[in-house]
Amino acid sequence: MMKRALLIPLLPAVLLLPVTLGGCDDGSKQAENVPSEDEASAEDAAIKVELPPSPDFDEGKVADKWEDGSLSIYGLRKSLEENVKEGDKGTEIMVKGFVQDIYEPPECPEGETCPPAKQPHIWIADKEEEKGKKRAMMVVGYQFSIPEWEAEQWKDVPDVQFEKGKRYTFKGTFKRFSDTGFADARGLLDFRFYKVVDEASGTEVWVAPPGAAWHPKTLALQEEQQKKLIEKVNKDASKKRG
């Protein structure tokens, strides 16, 4: 008997073509969606990134000292720790600045109880057009309460008065904590004198606030009292020896 060969039918090659062609077609579509290098560069260039302007570190900067030798606020705070130490020792300095703001106690409605007003103080700045308190400095301790029994002796002595926007030269001590309870980490000026033009002579003079312990009139009164006390002691001693 004649054996028949086992025939295994081959799959037609054409049936494999769709699978192969399909894979190539997908790749082509994906490639179409990817931008070229030129297109990507153009898109990146179209994106605008806006950054804040660089800070102006020279903003507010002035000379350390003015022509007359007085310090600027900038110059005073430039050596903050050193100047505060000197102020705590009682060393007086001379500072010049424009009055930027003057404290005004808030009005208290009639019949209401309001917190006590702060003590008088002003803010000075190196530049007349300076706004805000960022570079301004407080000046405090230029007004004192005078007892009734001393009112007569101070009646003709002018008070310390400031005009907003006007430039003044001050003497005082530079501190973080004032003698009257004010505080500022950047330093403040504890007032002693300011320079004004004397109407009678037309010359500039240093003026202290009435009632201040360092006012020339206060010192003169203390000297007079001391003199009278010494005279009394000497007189009593003479009586005892006599």
Image (cartoon, helix red, strand yellow):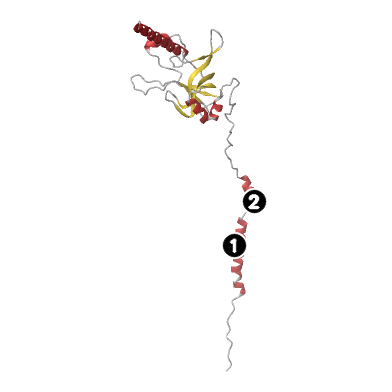
Q: Of the residues tagged 2 and 1, which is closer to the observer?
A: 2
Residue in the foreground of this view, choosing between 29 and 14: 29
| Residue at the extreme right | 38
Q: Where is residue 124 in the image (x, y as percent from the top left)?
A: 52, 23
Which amino acid does the dot numbered 2 rest on? Answer: Glu
Residue that label 2 marks: 39
Q: Specify few, some or many for label 1: CA neighbours under 10 Å numbering under 14, 14-19, or 20 or more.
A: few
In the rendered image of this protein, does residue 200 appear above or below residue 173? above
Residue in the foreground of this view, choosing between 228 and 241: 241
Left or right of 49: which side holds 185?
left
Q: Specify few, some or many for label 2: CA neighbours under 10 Å numbering under 14, 14-19, or 20 or more.
A: few
**Label located before the other in sequence (2 or 1):** 1
> Secondary structure under badge 1?
helix
Which amino acid does the dot numbered 1 rest on? Answer: Asp
3D distance between C-alphas at marks 2 and 1: 22 Å
> Secondary structure under badge 2?
helix
Residue in the foreground of this view, choosing between 106 and 242: 242
